[in-house]
Amino acid sequence: MDVVLRRPLIAGCGSGEPCASCATRPFSVCAAIDDHDIARLAAAMVEIAVERGRTFIHEGEPAGHFFNVTRGTAKLFKLLPDGRRQITGFAGRGYFLGLAVDKAYAFSAEAIDDVRVCRFSRPKMYRLMDDFPALEKRLLEVAANELVSAQEQMLLLGRKTARERLASFLLALCSPSGDHEGRYPIVHLAMNRGDIADYLGMTTETVSRTFSILKSQKVISMPSASDIRVEALEKLRAFATGGD
Amino acid sequence: MDVVLRRPLIAGCGSGEPCASCATRPFSVCAAIDDHDIARLAAAMVEIAVERGRTFIHEGEPAGHFFNVTRGTAKLFKLLPDGRRQITGFAGRGYFLGLAVDKAYAFSAEAIDDVRVCRFSRPKMYRLMDDFPALEKRLLEVAANELVSAQEQMLLLGRKTARERLASFLLALCSPSGDHEGRYPIVHLAMNRGDIADYLGMTTETVSRTFSILKSQKVISMPSASDIRVEALEKLRAFATGGD
DNA sequence: CGCACACTTGAACCCCCTCAACCCAAGTGG
DNA sequence: CCACTTGGGTTGAGGGGGTTCAAGTGTGCG
């Protein structure tokens, strides 16, 4: 079983520590709760360590909890009966997980590396949303964001070529770290080739081959298999949207 | 330009009629507003007629409005510079449109047939959300639903074969109309082959061919090109998830 | 009646998948 | 210290599902 790191203290005992000092809070929905209310949040959650490779959300099972990733990265995926897999996203630090319908998870989640999550029970979370409108507002914002990137991913999966897919993928990994004007960004890949393939609707072989092509065209270089240095950002941008 | 059908009356003049008697309200987010507050909703919106073929939301443009479809169907899509198109969804009666980030629309919307929408200005809508938490709650619910179907669509686009895609598509069109135990449902297609293709990540030719295959296997029959009768629901279900 | 346009069908091609071998770095154990 | 194993990544050869290009076949509407 997963390891529970911190149980919330009994209410009124000076709890609230974990969330108050949480380094991930600024990047997550938890930022919607003010400092003087943060104990309420802390009391509703349990922090859990998920070891690499462990699946902590199972598609189709009753959606009893919400999660917030505070460390590591998880892959979110759906499976077909014969084992084909589509990774629908990667959940890094600050990522909020568990928005579901019909009270069943729509996807599974597996830790890519050692992950820590804050787990909120569904009823407690709903309680919090009622009490803190800012939290609900933030969740709607998060959901809208997710929706937009899901649509972008549909465009990728439905209409882009292998090279365009990989270029788009690398760009998406570049941008969060801010501007790179003049400086060529290095992207670290937390996931392996199989994960990238299942995210982009390809095979590991095609992912590998396409990396090689980008390398031979001097658009990227690879200090190691999981570190990509972007050598020609503009060209990568062109590739991502069908340019040449 | 689009035709404005009803301008909201000046506040305090007995407005509220349009929403109070709206037949679409029960199916839409508007149901979250009680009867005695419904005038507030009506005062915030303008009903607009969009003729078939007209694009009334443009990807990338400032997202000044939210929309609610009350009649007809619209297709939502994204384009690549060279014209490749991915339809991300179809918006029928009761569908809420416009959740966006960065205040720019992430997709375009075009009327498939004659469409009517209720248009809400963004600031007014935010005002309403603040005043009616139930509305915001409903929107979050809607967004979560959208997210789930977006993930399902990613699985389809990334991993399914042509036959599996078309079977999934037909099934999705069957289910809303309730159970069909013993009765074979007839699905009416509001969109043409090109739209289906762009929704499923295929070409019109492959869509057509695949329809023909399903027909020859007696899984469906086609009273007309835009009416599909499901003759073997179980087989269609099997096809949709990779069975045979 | 005939034009227009959507849909269907056919044939050739191609991008990506499949299957298989190979490389390489990181253990592991004798 | 080196043989062996293991697992991820890469590369190669061949095949197939879907696209492309092109020619029919309806079918509604003037």
Image (cartoon, coloured by chain):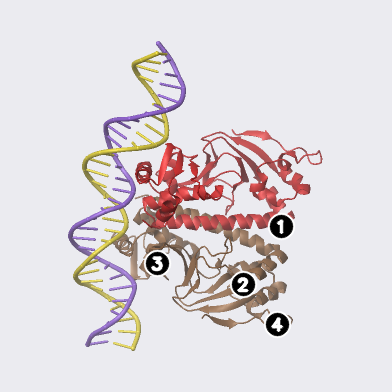
Chain colours: A red, B brown, C purple, D yellow
Asked whether, in this view, residue B90 is left or right of residue A160, the answer is: right
Q: Are marks 3 and 1 in contact (CB under 8 Å)?
A: no
The chain letter for the residue carrying disc 2 is: B
Q: Chain of mark 3?
A: B
Residue that carries the numbered disc 3 in the rendered image: B195
Query: Do circles 4 and 2 both sit on a common chain?
Result: yes
Marks 3/1 same chain = no
Q: Do tags 2 and 3 sit on the same chain?
A: yes
Q: Amino acid at mark 2?
A: Phe
Q: Are marks 2 and 1 in contact (CB under 8 Å)?
A: no
In percent of width and height, residue B126 lies at 67, 66
N-terminal of the pair, mark 4 or mark 3, is 4
Q: Which picture quadrant has residue A208?
A: top left
Residue B155 in view (yes/no): no
CA separation, marks 4 and 3?
41 Å
Label 4 in the same subunit as label 3 = yes
Residue tagged by mark 1?
A133
Res A144 → quadrant: bottom right
Q: Residue at x 63, y 79 (%)?
A: B18
State the mark number for residue B6: none
The answer to which quarter of the image holds residue A47 is: top right
Instruction: Identify the residue position indicated by label 2 in the image.
Output: B120
Asked if the residue at tag 3 contacts the one at tag 4, i.e. Cβ–Cβ closer than 8 Å, the answer is no
Residue D4 appears left or right of A73 = left
Question: In the picture shown, does residue A234 fall above or below D1?
Answer: below
Judge by depth and name the residue closer to the eye, A190 or A29.
A190
Q: At which x and y percent is residue A143? A: 59, 56
Label 4, label 1: how far apart the Cα atoms are: 30 Å
The amino acid beneath tag 4 is: Ile
Nearer to us of marks 2 and 3 is: 2
Amino acid under disc 3: Asp
Question: In the figure, A177 relative to B227: above or below?
Answer: above
